[in-house]
Image: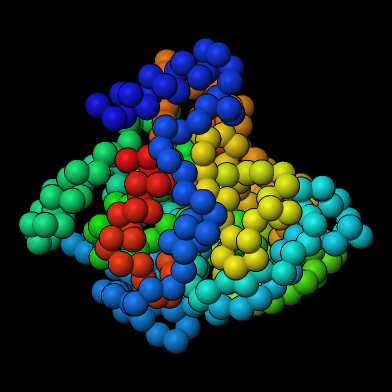
Protein backbone atom coordinates (compact mmCIF):
# COMPACT_ATOMS: atom_id res chain seq x y z
CA UNK A 1 0.00 0.00 0.00
CA UNK A 2 2.86 2.42 0.88
CA UNK A 3 4.50 1.82 -2.48
CA UNK A 4 1.17 2.41 -4.28
CA UNK A 5 0.71 5.65 -2.38
CA UNK A 6 4.26 6.77 -3.15
CA UNK A 7 3.81 5.83 -6.81
CA UNK A 8 0.58 7.84 -7.01
CA UNK A 9 2.27 10.85 -5.43
CA UNK A 10 5.18 10.56 -7.85
CA UNK A 11 2.80 10.37 -10.84
CA UNK A 12 0.96 13.48 -9.74
CA UNK A 13 4.26 15.31 -9.39
CA UNK A 14 5.35 14.20 -12.85
CA UNK A 15 2.10 15.36 -14.45
CA UNK A 16 2.55 18.75 -12.84
CA UNK A 17 6.22 18.90 -13.85
CA UNK A 18 7.09 19.97 -10.37
CA UNK A 19 8.84 16.88 -9.04
CA UNK A 20 11.85 18.81 -7.82
CA UNK A 21 9.57 20.71 -5.47
CA UNK A 22 7.58 17.62 -4.42
CA UNK A 23 8.12 17.47 -0.66
CA UNK A 24 8.00 14.39 1.53
CA UNK A 25 5.22 14.21 4.07
CA UNK A 26 7.62 13.19 6.82
CA UNK A 27 8.93 15.58 9.43
CA UNK A 28 12.52 16.41 8.53
CA UNK A 29 14.81 16.62 11.56
CA UNK A 30 17.01 19.63 12.04
CA UNK A 31 20.61 19.38 10.87
CA UNK A 32 21.98 18.75 14.37
CA UNK A 33 19.63 15.78 14.89
CA UNK A 34 20.46 14.39 11.45
CA UNK A 35 24.19 14.67 12.03
CA UNK A 36 23.95 12.94 15.41
CA UNK A 37 22.45 9.91 13.65
CA UNK A 38 25.65 9.57 11.60
CA UNK A 39 28.06 9.74 14.52
CA UNK A 40 29.90 6.90 16.17
CA UNK A 41 28.05 4.50 18.48
CA UNK A 42 29.07 1.30 20.33
CA UNK A 43 30.16 -1.40 17.90
CA UNK A 44 28.22 -4.64 17.39
CA UNK A 45 29.42 -6.40 14.24
CA UNK A 46 29.25 -9.94 12.91
CA UNK A 47 31.94 -9.29 10.30
CA UNK A 48 35.47 -10.63 10.07
CA UNK A 49 37.59 -7.55 10.68
CA UNK A 50 41.21 -6.40 10.59
CA UNK A 51 43.01 -3.12 11.20
CA UNK A 52 42.82 -2.37 7.47
CA UNK A 53 39.21 -3.42 6.98
CA UNK A 54 37.19 -6.58 6.71
CA UNK A 55 35.46 -9.00 4.37
CA UNK A 56 31.71 -9.41 4.75
CA UNK A 57 30.24 -12.72 3.58
CA UNK A 58 26.50 -12.55 3.03
CA UNK A 59 24.94 -15.20 5.35
CA UNK A 60 23.69 -18.39 3.65
CA UNK A 61 25.75 -17.58 0.54
CA UNK A 62 29.35 -17.69 -0.63
CA UNK A 63 29.13 -14.11 -1.89
CA UNK A 64 31.32 -11.54 -0.15
CA UNK A 65 32.55 -7.99 -0.48
CA UNK A 66 35.49 -6.06 1.00
CA UNK A 67 35.40 -2.97 3.18
CA UNK A 68 38.41 -0.68 3.72
CA UNK A 69 39.06 1.20 6.97
CA UNK A 70 38.96 4.98 6.52
CA UNK A 71 40.49 6.85 9.48
CA UNK A 72 38.57 9.73 10.98
CA UNK A 73 40.05 13.17 10.53
CA UNK A 74 39.75 16.55 8.86
CA UNK A 75 40.08 17.68 5.26
CA UNK A 76 39.26 20.64 3.07
CA UNK A 77 36.12 19.86 1.08
CA UNK A 78 35.61 21.42 -2.33
CA UNK A 79 38.03 22.83 -4.88
CA UNK A 80 40.06 26.04 -4.97
CA UNK A 81 38.97 28.70 -7.46
CA UNK A 82 42.22 28.11 -9.33
CA UNK A 83 41.40 24.45 -10.15
CA UNK A 84 40.84 23.82 -13.85
CA UNK A 85 37.22 23.20 -14.88
CA UNK A 86 35.96 24.13 -11.40
CA UNK A 87 32.22 24.77 -10.96
CA UNK A 88 30.68 27.17 -8.47
CA UNK A 89 28.97 24.37 -6.52
CA UNK A 90 32.41 23.04 -5.52
CA UNK A 91 32.83 25.86 -3.06
CA UNK A 92 33.40 27.73 -0.97
CA UNK A 93 36.04 25.36 0.34
CA UNK A 94 35.36 24.25 3.87
CA UNK A 95 37.28 22.31 6.51
CA UNK A 96 35.30 19.21 7.48
CA UNK A 97 35.75 16.79 10.37
CA UNK A 98 34.56 13.19 10.02
CA UNK A 99 34.37 10.14 12.26
CA UNK A 100 36.06 6.87 11.24
CA UNK A 101 34.19 4.56 8.89
CA UNK A 102 34.56 1.69 6.46
CA UNK A 103 34.14 2.16 2.72
CA UNK A 104 33.54 -0.39 0.02
CA UNK A 105 36.84 -1.35 -1.59
CA UNK A 106 34.98 -1.60 -4.88
CA UNK A 107 31.74 -0.31 -6.28
CA UNK A 108 28.82 -2.60 -5.43
CA UNK A 109 28.62 -5.43 -7.95
CA UNK A 110 25.66 -7.20 -9.48
CA UNK A 111 26.17 -10.49 -7.62
CA UNK A 112 25.33 -8.90 -4.26
CA UNK A 113 22.67 -6.52 -5.56
CA UNK A 114 20.83 -9.31 -7.38
CA UNK A 115 20.45 -11.26 -4.13
CA UNK A 116 18.22 -8.37 -3.15
CA UNK A 117 16.24 -7.44 -6.23
CA UNK A 118 15.67 -10.97 -7.55
CA UNK A 119 13.87 -11.78 -4.29
CA UNK A 120 15.82 -14.95 -3.54
CA UNK A 121 14.01 -15.42 -0.23
CA UNK A 122 14.52 -19.17 -0.19
CA UNK A 123 18.25 -18.62 0.32
CA UNK A 124 17.74 -17.00 3.71
CA UNK A 125 15.05 -19.22 5.26
CA UNK A 126 17.61 -20.94 7.48
CA UNK A 127 18.50 -17.73 9.31
CA UNK A 128 16.94 -17.09 12.71
CA UNK A 129 13.18 -16.50 12.60
CA UNK A 130 13.35 -12.87 13.69
CA UNK A 131 15.77 -11.99 10.92
CA UNK A 132 13.75 -13.91 8.31
CA UNK A 133 10.62 -11.99 9.30
CA UNK A 134 12.43 -8.67 9.01
CA UNK A 135 13.87 -9.61 5.62
CA UNK A 136 10.45 -10.66 4.33
CA UNK A 137 8.97 -7.36 5.48
CA UNK A 138 11.30 -5.31 3.26
CA UNK A 139 9.73 -4.44 -0.07
CA UNK A 140 11.72 -5.65 -3.07
CA UNK A 141 12.11 -3.82 -6.39
CA UNK A 142 9.68 -4.32 -9.23
CA UNK A 143 11.26 -6.03 -12.26
CA UNK A 144 13.27 -3.59 -14.40
CA UNK A 145 11.69 -2.51 -17.68
CA UNK A 146 14.78 -3.71 -19.54
CA UNK A 147 18.18 -5.16 -18.72
CA UNK A 148 19.62 -2.58 -16.29
CA UNK A 149 23.17 -3.53 -17.27
CA UNK A 150 22.42 -2.78 -20.93
CA UNK A 151 24.44 -5.85 -21.88
CA UNK A 152 27.68 -4.40 -20.51
CA UNK A 153 28.22 -7.38 -18.19
CA UNK A 154 27.34 -8.52 -14.67
CA UNK A 155 30.02 -10.92 -13.46
CA UNK A 156 32.36 -8.63 -11.51
CA UNK A 157 30.87 -5.46 -12.96
CA UNK A 158 29.30 -2.54 -11.04
CA UNK A 159 25.54 -2.59 -10.48
CA UNK A 160 23.96 0.45 -12.16
CA UNK A 161 20.66 1.98 -13.31
CA UNK A 162 18.96 1.93 -9.91
CA UNK A 163 17.49 4.94 -8.11
CA UNK A 164 18.91 6.37 -4.89
CA UNK A 165 15.77 5.04 -3.18
CA UNK A 166 16.54 1.55 -4.48
CA UNK A 167 20.10 1.66 -3.12
CA UNK A 168 18.85 2.72 0.31
CA UNK A 169 16.29 -0.09 0.50
CA UNK A 170 19.10 -2.44 -0.53
CA UNK A 171 21.23 -1.08 2.30
CA UNK A 172 18.40 -1.71 4.77
CA UNK A 173 18.01 -5.26 3.42
CA UNK A 174 21.77 -5.91 3.61
CA UNK A 175 21.93 -4.50 7.13
CA UNK A 176 19.11 -6.85 8.14
CA UNK A 177 20.70 -9.91 6.53
CA UNK A 178 24.22 -9.33 7.86
CA UNK A 179 23.45 -7.73 11.21
CA UNK A 180 25.84 -4.86 10.39
CA UNK A 181 24.63 -1.36 9.51
CA UNK A 182 25.29 -0.28 5.92
CA UNK A 183 24.27 2.89 4.10
CA UNK A 184 25.39 5.25 1.36
CA UNK A 185 28.23 7.65 2.19
CA UNK A 186 27.45 11.32 2.60
CA UNK A 187 28.98 13.70 0.07
CA UNK A 188 31.60 14.67 2.65
CA UNK A 189 32.48 11.04 3.44
CA UNK A 190 32.66 10.24 -0.25
CA UNK A 191 35.01 13.13 -1.09
CA UNK A 192 37.17 12.46 1.96
CA UNK A 193 37.61 8.84 0.89
CA UNK A 194 38.18 9.81 -2.76
CA UNK A 195 40.88 12.33 -1.90
CA UNK A 196 42.57 9.87 0.47
CA UNK A 197 44.70 12.57 2.05
CA UNK A 198 45.48 14.42 -1.19
CA UNK A 199 44.66 18.02 -2.05
CA UNK A 200 45.02 17.75 -5.83
CA UNK A 201 42.26 17.64 -8.45
CA UNK A 202 42.53 13.85 -8.60
CA UNK A 203 43.92 11.49 -5.98
CA UNK A 204 46.85 10.85 -8.32
CA UNK A 205 47.65 14.53 -9.00
CA UNK A 206 46.44 17.57 -10.93
CA UNK A 207 47.34 16.37 -14.40
CA UNK A 208 45.29 13.95 -16.51
CA UNK A 209 48.47 12.52 -18.03
CA UNK A 210 48.21 9.42 -15.81
CA UNK A 211 44.44 9.09 -15.74
CA UNK A 212 44.30 5.96 -17.91
CA UNK A 213 46.06 4.03 -15.14
CA UNK A 214 43.48 5.04 -12.53
CA UNK A 215 40.13 5.54 -14.21
CA UNK A 216 37.67 4.17 -16.74
CA UNK A 217 36.24 7.18 -18.58
CA UNK A 218 34.98 8.27 -21.99
CA UNK A 219 38.25 8.06 -23.91
CA UNK A 220 39.26 4.58 -22.74
CA UNK A 221 35.97 2.88 -21.85
CA UNK A 222 34.92 1.61 -25.29
CA UNK A 223 31.43 2.92 -24.40
CA UNK A 224 30.86 0.61 -21.43
CA UNK A 225 31.84 0.12 -17.83
CA UNK A 226 34.67 -2.21 -16.79
CA UNK A 227 35.03 -4.84 -14.09
CA UNK A 228 35.55 -3.24 -10.70
CA UNK A 229 39.19 -2.91 -9.65
CA UNK A 230 40.54 -2.98 -13.18
CA UNK A 231 42.57 0.21 -12.60
CA UNK A 232 44.97 1.34 -9.87
CA UNK A 233 43.52 2.22 -6.43
CA UNK A 234 43.80 5.55 -4.67
CA UNK A 235 46.26 5.97 -1.73
CA UNK A 236 43.78 4.41 0.71
CA UNK A 237 43.23 1.28 -1.38
CA UNK A 238 39.85 2.26 -2.85
CA UNK A 239 39.28 1.39 -6.51
CA UNK A 240 37.29 3.29 -9.15
CA UNK A 241 36.69 6.39 -7.04
CA UNK A 242 37.39 8.19 -10.31
CA UNK A 243 35.24 6.92 -13.17
CA UNK A 244 33.76 3.53 -14.11
CA UNK A 245 30.37 4.05 -12.40
CA UNK A 246 29.39 7.32 -10.78
CA UNK A 247 28.16 6.76 -7.21
CA UNK A 248 25.05 7.81 -5.31
CA UNK A 249 25.54 9.63 -2.02
CA UNK A 250 23.19 10.09 0.93
CA UNK A 251 22.69 13.82 0.29
CA UNK A 252 20.11 15.89 -1.43
CA UNK A 253 21.95 18.07 -3.94
CA UNK A 254 22.05 21.75 -3.04
CA UNK A 255 24.29 24.10 -4.96
CA UNK A 256 25.13 26.14 -1.86
CA UNK A 257 25.51 23.18 0.51
CA UNK A 258 29.00 24.07 1.68
CA UNK A 259 27.88 27.48 2.85
CA UNK A 260 25.05 26.09 5.00
CA UNK A 261 26.05 22.69 6.40
CA UNK A 262 27.90 21.97 9.63
CA UNK A 263 31.63 21.29 9.74
CA UNK A 264 31.28 18.05 11.75
CA UNK A 265 29.81 15.05 9.84
CA UNK A 266 27.76 17.23 7.46
CA UNK A 267 24.73 15.73 5.74
CA UNK A 268 22.09 17.44 3.61
CA UNK A 269 19.10 15.31 4.55
CA UNK A 270 16.89 14.63 1.51
CA UNK A 271 13.44 16.19 1.25
CA UNK A 272 12.86 15.62 -2.50
CA UNK A 273 13.17 12.78 -5.00
CA UNK A 274 15.33 14.94 -7.28
CA UNK A 275 17.95 16.31 -7.15
CA UNK A 276 20.13 13.83 -5.24
CA UNK A 277 23.89 14.07 -5.39
CA UNK A 278 26.16 11.54 -7.05
CA UNK A 279 29.94 11.63 -7.35
CA UNK A 280 33.04 10.39 -9.12
CA UNK A 281 32.18 10.59 -12.80
CA UNK A 282 31.69 7.55 -15.01
CA UNK A 283 32.73 5.56 -18.05
CA UNK A 284 30.65 8.02 -20.11
CA UNK A 285 32.29 11.21 -18.79
CA UNK A 286 35.25 13.30 -19.86
CA UNK A 287 38.28 13.39 -17.56
CA UNK A 288 37.43 16.74 -15.96
CA UNK A 289 34.17 15.28 -14.56
CA UNK A 290 36.19 12.71 -12.59
CA UNK A 291 37.86 15.24 -10.28
CA UNK A 292 37.47 14.58 -6.55
CA UNK A 293 35.43 17.76 -5.98
CA UNK A 294 32.92 17.36 -8.81
CA UNK A 295 29.26 17.21 -7.75
CA UNK A 296 26.40 16.08 -9.99
CA UNK A 297 22.66 16.44 -9.41
CA UNK A 298 20.14 13.80 -10.44
CA UNK A 299 17.16 14.80 -12.56
CA UNK A 300 14.09 13.50 -14.39
CA UNK A 301 16.27 13.07 -17.48
CA UNK A 302 17.54 9.85 -15.93
CA UNK A 303 14.05 8.38 -16.29
CA UNK A 304 12.96 9.87 -19.61
CA UNK A 305 12.82 6.57 -21.55
CA UNK A 306 10.88 4.73 -18.86
CA UNK A 307 7.45 4.16 -20.51
CA UNK A 308 5.75 3.09 -17.28
CA UNK A 309 3.08 5.28 -15.71
CA UNK A 310 3.93 6.12 -13.02
CA UNK A 311 7.65 5.85 -13.61
CA UNK A 312 9.58 3.33 -11.53
CA UNK A 313 10.69 4.19 -8.02
CA UNK A 314 13.38 1.55 -8.33
CA UNK A 315 15.03 1.88 -11.73
CA UNK A 316 16.33 4.89 -13.66
CA UNK A 317 16.28 3.74 -17.27
CA UNK A 318 18.71 6.42 -18.43
CA UNK A 319 21.34 6.13 -15.71
CA UNK A 320 23.38 3.10 -16.70
CA UNK A 321 26.42 5.11 -15.62
CA UNK A 322 25.38 5.53 -11.94
CA UNK A 323 25.91 2.88 -9.27
CA UNK A 324 26.94 3.06 -5.62
CA UNK A 325 29.46 2.11 -2.96
CA UNK A 326 28.74 0.95 0.59
CA UNK A 327 29.69 2.77 3.77
CA UNK A 328 29.53 1.52 7.37
CA UNK A 329 30.35 3.59 10.50
CA UNK A 330 33.27 2.18 12.48
CA UNK A 331 31.10 2.35 15.58
CA UNK A 332 27.64 1.12 14.86
CA UNK A 333 24.37 2.93 15.66
CA UNK A 334 21.99 1.23 18.10
CA UNK A 335 18.94 -0.65 16.75
CA UNK A 336 16.75 2.28 17.80
CA UNK A 337 18.95 4.76 15.95
CA UNK A 338 18.98 2.54 12.87
CA UNK A 339 15.19 2.39 12.93
CA UNK A 340 14.98 6.19 13.05
CA UNK A 341 17.49 6.44 10.20
CA UNK A 342 15.48 4.15 7.91
CA UNK A 343 12.27 5.98 8.79
CA UNK A 344 13.94 9.22 7.79
CA UNK A 345 15.58 8.24 4.50
CA UNK A 346 12.84 5.88 3.28
CA UNK A 347 9.88 7.92 4.57
CA UNK A 348 8.55 4.89 6.46
Instruction: State which quarter of the image contains the N terminus.
Output: top left
**251 relative to 223 in the view: left or right:** left
Percent of width and height locating residue 237:
57, 75
The residue sitting at the top extreme is 15
Against 33, residue 343 (above or below) is above
Percent of width and height locating residue 149:
47, 40
Corner quadrant of residue 93: bottom right
Q: Which of 220 and 282 lies nearest the eye of the viewer? A: 282
Percent of width and height locating residue 161:
49, 39
Q: State the residue at coordinates (22%, 64%).
A: 59
Percent of width and height locating residue 163:
47, 38
Corner quadrant of residue 51: bottom left
Against 43, residue 306 (above or below) is above
**326 relative to 181 in the view: left or right:** right
Residue 102 appears in the figure: no
Q: State the residue at coordinates (59%, 17%).
A: 17
Residue 265 appears in the figure: yes
Amino acid sequence: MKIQIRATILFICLLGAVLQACKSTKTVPDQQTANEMLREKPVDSLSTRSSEGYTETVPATEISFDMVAVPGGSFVMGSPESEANRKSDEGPQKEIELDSFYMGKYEMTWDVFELFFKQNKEIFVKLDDDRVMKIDAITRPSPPYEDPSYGMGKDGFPAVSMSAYSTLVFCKWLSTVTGKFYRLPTEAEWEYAARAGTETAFSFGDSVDDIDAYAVYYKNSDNKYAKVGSKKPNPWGLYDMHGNAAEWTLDEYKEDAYATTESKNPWVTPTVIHPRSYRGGSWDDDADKLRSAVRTASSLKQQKRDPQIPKSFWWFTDSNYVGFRLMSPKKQPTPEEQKKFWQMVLDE
